[in-house]
Amino acid sequence: MKNHAWRPLAVVIGAVALLLLVRANVVPSDFGVNGENFTYGFHRKGSIDDWKAVQIKYKGREYCRECHEEKVTENESSPHKVIECENCHGPAIEHPDNPEKLVVDRSRGLCLRCHAFLPYPQSHRSEMPAIDPDEHNPDQACADCHNPHNPNLEAM
C-alpha cells in the first residue's frame, strides 16, 4: 500500500481503539447482563433497583377515596370526572403524614389550561365550556364562583 492509504487507516484504527477504551471505562459493568432477549441488551441490571427506590408521587383517585369518599363521589358525577384529584391538589406523595394537608391550586391559570377559548377551527367542537379570560371575571379566582368538584353548581 502507498503512504496515502496508511495514514487514514492508522487514524481509523486509532479512533476505534480510543472508542473501545472509552467504552470500557464509561459503560457500567452490569450493562446488558440480561442478554439479548431484554431490549436487545440495552439494559442495565442495576437500574431495576434504582427504579424500585423511586418514591411514587402520584397515588391516584382510589388512594384519595380512602379518606375523602364524599368528595371523590361528588367529583365522579361531575364533568370533571376525567381529572385526577392530584391535578388540582398536588401529588399525594406521603400524604396525610407529610404533608398533612395538600395545598390546593386555586389559581385561574389552572382552570384556564382547559377552559380558555382557543380560536382554532376544531376548538368549537369540544364539549368543554370555554371562556374568554379577559371578559369573564378577569380579576377573580374561578373557585370563588364555581365548585371545582361539581362545576355545574355555584360555589359553596
Image (tube, rainbow, N blue to C red):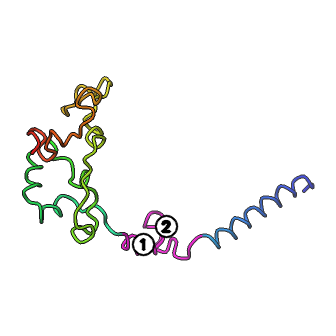
Vertical position of residue 113 compared to residue 123: above or below: below
In which image quadrant can residue 18 be found? bottom right
Q: Name the residue under label 2.
A: 41
In which image quadrant can residue 60 be found? bottom left
What range is drawn magenta here? Answer: 27-54
Q: Pointer 2: residues within 10 angstroms few (<14), some, or many (20+)?
A: few
The x, y position of residue 144, in whole percent, is 17, 41
Residue at figure coordinates x 22%, y 27% from the top left: 125
The x, y position of residue 71, in whole percent, is 10, 54
The verdict on residue 31 being magenta is yes
- Quick one: SS at disc 1? helix
Q: Pointer 1: residues within 10 angstroms few (<14), some, or many (20+)?
A: few
- Quick one: SS at disc 2? helix
User: Residue 142 vs residue 153: left or right?
Assistant: right
The x, y position of residue 67, in whole percent, is 12, 65
Q: Which mark is residue 50?
A: 1
User: Residue 7 vs residue 33: left or right?
Assistant: right
Vertical position of residue 106 compared to residue 59: above or below: above
